Image: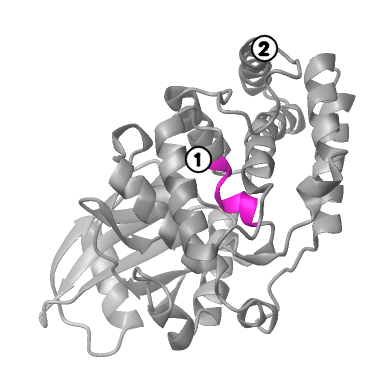
Amino acid sequence: MTRSPLTLAALATSAVAGLDVINTQGFGSPGGEFDAAILTGRDGRHWIIRVPRSPAAELEQSADLVALRALSAGARSRLPFAISTFAGQVPVGDTRAVVSEFVYGSKVSLSAMSLELASSIGAAIAAIHSLPPNLVIDAGLPSHSPVETLRAVVTLMDRAAATGLVPAGLLARWERATEETMMWQFTPTVVNGGVASDSFLANGDEVTGMLGWHGLRVGDPAADLQWLAGSGLDQLADAAFASYSHARGNVDRQLRQRASLLAELEIARWLLHGTETRSTEIVDDAVGMLSALVDDVHLDMTNPIGGATMPLGVDEVEALLERTSHIH
């Protein structure tokens, strides 16, 4: 049963001592993973309260809290955008309501993104990747080496191949990428781990905040850029990668190639989700996307992974991000 904004406001006053709510409004879609509301305090500050509606959402919220605690004041001062701050929690049945300070800004749409905003996003991601890895490692969060990253990619490919539904030429394309030794010689960085266009909040052409930190870890920086590499929007991707490289230097020459590979493998991940949940609809959707990918890349050496022409169009990318957001 969906909780009303008034109910959520009452929970928030129990979770945060001294909070005097004078206005509340629902936040998010009714069918989402959380009951959520934006609250306005008498002091003019704004807050968000979220109550998970499923075990998966509860796990995501718990991971998010661990990550936010790991991001110390010193770490936050290095970032050119705001991150929500935990304010309090209160039990709600078998789960809990969590209240955090609200980060201002509008969610970013890939289809409406400007080149200037893409540049701001590239700089924002570079700032995350420049954080000291120890702040994540010391918090007990995951850390993956290049070898472990490559092993995970190969395992995903093998599982997808075992379904018998991935075109042979596409598997060969991916295998060639995993055999390129230089592609996997990167320095692991702090990564958000779940970045998509709507992870960012913006005011005009500037990133003001970032949502969703449950995937925080040390690992392959390409993980935070795959959604751009696979967008099919070359100018936006070029602007973001150029801004990223300007901020961090040319420290990872194969970054875009790996990001492109990971973007294509999201379709394999979607296929596996369909087979594991025995959803004919998801499997058929994934098979159709794989077929479209085959047509687009031609499976030859003139269109290698990381080339100028990327496989998925903007509508397909936004749909894929929506489909796969709950399987990470």
Check if residue 223 falls in the magenta segment. Answer: yes
Quote the CA–CA distance across marks 1 and 2.
Answer: 21 Å
Give the number of the disc on residue 308. Answer: none
Dominant SS in magenta: helix
Q: Tell me the amino acid under the disc marked 1.
A: Leu
Q: Is residue 271 left or right of residue 213?
A: right
Examine the image and state in which quarter residue 17 appears.
Answer: bottom left
Classed neighbour count for the residue bearing mark 1: other residues with Cα under 10 Å, few (<14), some (14–19), many (≥20): many
Q: Which residue is mark 2?
A: 291
Q: Tell me the amino acid under the disc marked 2.
A: Ser
Q: Is residue 193 left or right of residue 287?
A: left
Which of label 1 and label 2 is nearer to you? 1
Examine the image and state in which quarter residue 155 appears.
Answer: top right
Closer to us: 14 or 84: 84
Examine the image and state in which quarter residue 160 appears.
Answer: top right
**Local SS, label 1:** helix
**Local SS, label 2:** helix
Q: Give the magenta part as a residue range.
A: 221-227
Q: Which residue is mark 1?
A: 228
